[in-house]
Image (tube, rainbow, N blue to C red):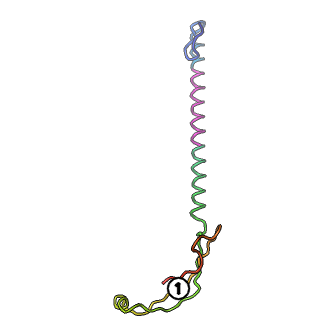
Amino acid sequence: MAASPLEPATVGSSNAGRMYVRDELETIRADRMRTRRAKLIGMCVVTVGMLVVAWRFAAGSPPISMRVLGFTGEQWSDDIAQRMGSREYVVATIAKIRVRGRPRRGSGIDRVG
């Protein structure tokens, strides 16, 4: 019957068997370390890649651009004017433009006041 590669050989010198086992164990440990190191490096590469993608989306230009087209003066109704302290207010007319892709529904000119 053949001896297991992890046990010392029973035939011949016991020192030779122990050396063989020691060499095999060192090889197994080295393989484990190499595998762990490869996994760690892989995880670091994936993490850095995800951070780069997230940074790219976060630091990109805003998807909507707004431009003020003009201002108009309006007047509150009597009951609202008493609460606001002033009868007049200003309304801005703005244009919303989508920077990337197709325009969304509702984009165009809006009045904000």
Q: Main secondary structure of the magenta part?
A: helix
Give the quadrant of residue 64: bottom right
Is residue 7 depicted above or below 93 in this figure?
above
Give the amino acid at mark 1.
Ala
Q: Is residue 90 magenta?
A: no
Q: Is residue 23 magenta?
A: yes
* Nearest the eye: 108 or 20: 108
Q: Position of residue 99 (x, y in %)?
A: 63, 71
Residue found 59% across the figure and 21% down from its top = 24
Is residue 79 depicted above or below 98 in this figure?
below
Circle 1 residue = 92
Helix, strand or loop for disc 1: strand
Magenta residues (range): 22-41
Q: Position of residue 39 (x, y in %)?
A: 58, 39
Is residue 64 depicted above or below 25 in this figure?
below
Q: Residues within 10 Å of mark 1 (few under 14, many from 20)?
A: some
Q: Is residue 19 left or right of residue 84?
A: right
Give the quadrant of residue 77: bottom left
Residue found 45% across the figure and 90% down from its top = 89
Q: How many marks?
A: 1
